[in-house]
């Protein structure tokens, strides 16, 4: 790239190129983007404009969403083709190109189906409009909990931008603060939404420094934020903020099932999406000796090639060398006392351009309650531990997805009843499985909407 790509803020009066701009390099450290960072006063004015704006009629916004999804996935947006966008995201974030391409298709599907997906959360006793004939006898009407929704987005995967489209479908005006790691996806998506019929005062993108970031949340009615455990802890008591943190997803194989029949699913759960997603498996528990399973996982994962992210066969996410070394140091410190089957001497593998991928790591634990089983890292890194009936379901607390390969229905009842296990997949189903209309971490509509009793003449 000879000239950087300018990513402007997308405010209520159109694009805005700020004086304060952040350089965003590719994974090898080469200049790639310049991201405008808007000041707090700009945020305040933009959020006020969202609040003043009216709500687009439902038919118009759903038609615009469908058109925007198609334009985002296949068209030219702000002078950039779909292929150039995908390549740039891959080089910038280190996300393998095949993963970017799948995410783009998923975002387009979400744009087309976001309203139908959101409706899955509507209580069966509620209707969408007070004009519904049921209101003559008295009914519940499903209404928004506010008008302005804010998103502090993550940059680890383009697919995170598929979820907030449900808020758009339900009539919210939306403000997105993009990740500094990968701001191009929200910029392209919001530009496509505007080109397809949404007004500039309906959806804005507000890149900010950390000082102004909280202003976006303060000015919104409801917000969704992404981050680590500190984000979960910070907003745990705030009913207007929906935090999305580590997944710590896990697999359990009990003695009544043979892990050899499920090794493909187990390995795929660890490495799919480059191992960076909250639904990738962090730990595998087996009732019995964990060593043979750990050895089998290591053998499979060791065959993954180290390739630059833009390669169409790439699997592993690339990082700048300093970022890769930092993660490696953390892993080596945390894995002290565990038996390494893969990655015990390090995981950094330098690529020809000076960036690096993190090779998979497999460690065996001797205690199901070992703290390492909840150490989640953004590459294929898994902890394999023994599980006993005495350990019970407690080891699975605070798990986004638990795949349970077992025939023990009493155990399954217990796992399903545990509110800290967000999703339970029974049998040969990878932890990354998702499909439209099925909740990821409950339905977003449960957070965005509420019911109101209505009766009319």
Image (cartoon, grey):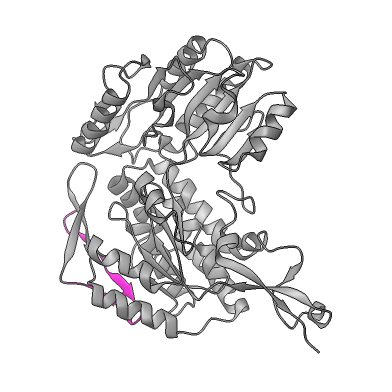
Give the residue at x 57% y 57%.
109
Residue at point 62%, 74% (across, down):
143
Quadrant in the rendering for residue 376: top left
* Residue 204 placement (x, y as % from top left): 38, 72
Looking at the image, residue 87 lies above or below residue 378: below
Residue 112 falls in image quadrant: bottom right
Q: Is residue 7 magenta?
A: yes
Q: Depth check: give the residue in front, 40 or 7.
A: 40
Above or below, 321 relative to 434: above
Q: Which residues are magenta?
A: 1-18
Q: Residue 322 in magenta?
A: no
Q: Is residue 347 visible?
A: no
Q: Residue furthest bottom?
A: 457
Q: Position of residue 209 (x, y in %)?
A: 23, 62
Is residue 80 something one can see in this rendering? yes
**Residue 213 sits in quarter:** bottom left
Q: For the C terminus, which image quadrant?
A: bottom right
């Amino acid at each position: 790239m000879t000239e950087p790509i300018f990513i402007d803020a997308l405010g209520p009066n159109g694009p805005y190129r700020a004086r304060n701009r952040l350089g965003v390099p590719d994974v090898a450290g080469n200049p790639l983007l310049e991201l405008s960072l808007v000041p707090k006063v700009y945020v305040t004015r933009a959020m006020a404009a969202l609040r003043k704006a009216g709500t687009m009629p439902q038919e118009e916004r759903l038609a615009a969403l469908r058109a925007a999804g198609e334009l985002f996935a296949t068209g030219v947006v702000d002078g950039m083709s779909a292929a150039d966008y995908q390549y740039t995201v891959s080089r910038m974030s280190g996300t393998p190109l095949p993963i970017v391409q799948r995410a783009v298709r998923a975002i387009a599907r979400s744009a087309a189906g976001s309203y139908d997906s959101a409706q899955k959360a509507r209580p069966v006793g509620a209707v969408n409009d007070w004009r519904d004939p049921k209101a003559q006898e008295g009914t519940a009407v499903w209404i928004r909990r506010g008008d302005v929704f804010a998103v502090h987005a993550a940059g680890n995967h383009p697919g995170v931008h598929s979820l907030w489209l449900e808020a758009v479908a339900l009539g919210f005006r939306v403000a997105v603060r993009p990740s500094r790691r990968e701001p191009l996806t929200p910029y392209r998506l919001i530009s496509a939404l505007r080109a397809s019929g949404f007004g500039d005062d309906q959806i804005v993108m507000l890149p900010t420094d950390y000082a102004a970031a909280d202003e976006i949340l303060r000015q919104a009615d409801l917000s969704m934020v992404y981050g680590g455990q500190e984000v979960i802890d910070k907003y745990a008591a705030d009913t207007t903020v929906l935090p999305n943190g580590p997944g710590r997803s896990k697999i359990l194989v009990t003695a009544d099932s043979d892990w050899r029949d499920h090794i493909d699913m187990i390995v795929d759960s660890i490495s799919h999406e480059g191992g960076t997603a909250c639904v990738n498996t962090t730990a595998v528990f087996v009732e019995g000796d964990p060593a043979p399973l750990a050895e089998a996982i290591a053998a499979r994962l060791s065959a993954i090639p180290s390739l630059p992210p833009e390669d169409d066969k790439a699997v592993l996410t690339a990082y700048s060398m300093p970022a890769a070394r930092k993660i490696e140091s953390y892993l080596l410190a945390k894995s002290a006392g565990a038996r390494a089957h893969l990655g015990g001497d390090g995981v950094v593998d330098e690529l020809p351009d000076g960036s690096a991928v993190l090779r998979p790591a497999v460690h065996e634990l001797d205690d199901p309650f070992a703290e390492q089983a909840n150490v989640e890292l953004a590459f294929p890194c898994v902890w394999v531990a023994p599980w006993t009936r005495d350990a019970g379901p407690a080891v699975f607390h605070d798990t986004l997805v638990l795949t349970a390969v077992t025939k023990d229905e009493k155990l399954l009842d217990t796992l399903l009843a545990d509110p800290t296990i967000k999703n339970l997949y029974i049998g040969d189903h990878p932890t990354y499985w998702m499909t439209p209309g099925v909740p990821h971490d409950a339905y977003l509509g449960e957070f965005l909407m509420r019911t109101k009793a209505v009766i009319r003449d």
